[in-house]
Image: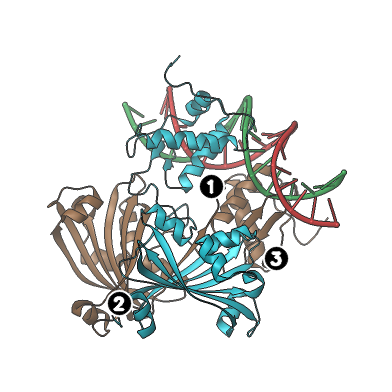
Chain colours: A brown, B cyan, C red, D green
DNA sequence: TAGTGGTCTAGACCACTCG
DNA sequence: GAGTGGTCTAGACCACTAG
């Protein structure tokens, strides 16, 4: 029996599901460097025995880590550790603040305007409103380490923007955090990216010459109930990079 | 017994797993318009009975459709149809040709160069090679309905590029299709996006003025075995749009 | 409280990969 | 052929949401 590492059966009391606990366990093992890139993990049956869970629970844990870009598995071969380029590439919906912090930057914001607005036809369509309905507009510059890197112009249905003011937003530091405190949880978003030249307003706010190419991202965010929460138009300076991970997978579970 | 729609138990012979068959079945029902946006599906237990499969198989099918942006489920509430804005937003790794066709455009390409090259330090790092190792460089303009919309400059390890020439590429219409015929299957990719101004070469090839803002996308594609297949630098004209779907599943804030 | 999805189990068999 | 992941089942209980 290995004395140093008792496999530690899951705590049967607390809130975390077993497969999640296992996933954490495996993740820590990997991050501790016990497995090289592309190295095979023990087989599912073996892991099930070691950690004293059912094979199905092991599969859930593995699948969880696959979604997060930590593991991948191949039919008759085994389960492997994703190469480090792929690992920790989140592919989830983070707020600017969380994302920036994860990259080792200090996120910040400067609130330019919080004001009522009326829905245009285009925005009404996206937010499921009628043209002219009341919106709250929040315009900010986003900063990394004090430097402006992006402009965000968000439009929320008035019902959702209710009670949001400059003070609250600056205190929360993140619009998503503020919404979450109100029980509105962003669950999904669709995004659309292009490039465009900075107009004179963009240029001034971002401190770049007019005509500078910007990464333009439109986003519609939906709640858990799939009610539109926000339409946001974002423009980023060329030094800002947007990363994703995509997988082909016609397979699933 | 409903006469019009016999629930049809799965064909027990052919190649498709049962949950996949169920998923297709459900997808067709949805696309036929039998369910409105955000409408609840029958419960898992009910579906299991109707389609004569186990509840777990139903759950796998639902999971499969969740990944594809067709369904979402909420704990105590039920399983629902994603609103149409979200549905069919693929989030998978398609070749330019497949993606363009899916958007209703006619994809095309003009091969500018296929030539040997040597790995720079930067590219060597990404492709897991040593600087100076042999590469195949494939430079193309990509067309939609005959109009140039993007420039792709791909670098493949010589071992993978082996045997690729202009004729083969033009015949296949797509690099991915050509690789697939050779048994090399792209499984995953990581991407990095920014904006940049068109230099004079870009401008000429894309038929836009110098300085036009372009959407720049770097991509590293990995095989099923997670061997680097390709590093590709892509530059797209502002009219081209890059779409994604992101979800915020069960991660911590 | 009734109904829903979420977790977990134990066991069986299939499909694939590789020596 | 031995070992791996993939599919499927049947049943149990928990956690959440609603009327």
Q: Secondary structure at mark 1?
A: loop
Closer to us: mark 3 or mark 1?
3
Residue linked to disc 2: B208
Residue linked to disc 3: A35
The answer to whether B90 is drawn above or below residue B120 in the figure is: above
Q: Secondary structure at mark 2?
A: loop
The answer to whether A54 is drawn above or below residue A239 in the figure is: above
Marks 2 and 3 close (CB-CB < 8 Å): no
Mark 1 crowdedness (10 Å alpha carbons): few <14, some 14-19, many ≥20: few
Q: Position of residue A228 (x, y in %)?
A: 28, 50
Task: Report whether B147 appears left or right of B130.
Answer: left
Disc marking residue A15: 1
The residue nearer to you, when weighing A139 against B151, is B151
Q: Position of residue B59 (x, y in %)?
A: 53, 37
Q: CA distance from mark 2 to mark 3?
A: 49 Å
The residue nearer to you, when weighing B235 against B174, is B174
User: Which residue lies most toward the front here?
Assistant: B167
Q: Residue A212: which quarter of the image?
A: bottom left
Q: Position of residue B32 (x, y in %)?
A: 37, 34
Residue at the spot x=35%, y=75% of the render? B206
> Is there any visible trace of residue A69 in the rendered image?
no
Marks 1 and 2 close (CB-CB < 8 Å): no
The residue nearer to you, when weighing D2 against A143, is D2
Q: CA distance from mark 3 to mark 1?
A: 29 Å
Residue at the spot x=39%, y=66% of the render? B143
Closer to us: mark 1 or mark 2?
2
Task: Report whether A116 appears left or right of A80.
Answer: left
Instruction: Tell me the chain of label 3.
Output: A
């Amino acid at each position: 029996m290995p004395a140093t590492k008792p496999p530690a059966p899951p705590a049967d009391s607390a809130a975390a599901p077993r497969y999640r606990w296992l996933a954490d366990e495996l993740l820590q093992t990997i991050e501790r460097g016990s497995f090289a890139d592309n190295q095979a993990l023990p087989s599912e049956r073996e892991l099930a025995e070691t950690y004293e869970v059912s094979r199905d629970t092991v599969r859930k844990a593995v699948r969880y880590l696959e979604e997060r870009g930590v593991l991948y598995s191949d039919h008759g071969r085994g389960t492997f550790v994703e190469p480090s380029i792929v690992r920790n590439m989140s592919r989830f919906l983070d707020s600017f603040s969380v994302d920036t912090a994860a990259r080792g930057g200090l996120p910040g914001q400067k609130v330019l305007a919080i004001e009522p607005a009326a829905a245009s036809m285009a925005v009404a369509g996206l937010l499921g409103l009628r043209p002219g309905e009341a919106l709250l507009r929040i315009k900010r510059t986003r900063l990394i380490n004090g430097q402006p890197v992006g402009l965000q112009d968000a439009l929320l249905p008035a019902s959702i923007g209710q009670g949001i003011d400059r003070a609250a937003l600056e205190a929360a530091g993140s619009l998503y955090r503020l919404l979450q405190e109100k029980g509105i949880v962003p669950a999904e978003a669709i995004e659309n990216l292009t490039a465009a030249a900075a107009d004179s307003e963009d240029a001034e706010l971002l401190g770049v010459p007019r005509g500078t190419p910007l990464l333009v991202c439109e986003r519609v965010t939906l709640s858990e109930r799939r009610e539109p929460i926000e339409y946001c138009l974002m423009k980023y300076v060329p030094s800002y990079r947007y990363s994703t991970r995509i997988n082909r997978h016609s397979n699933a579970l």
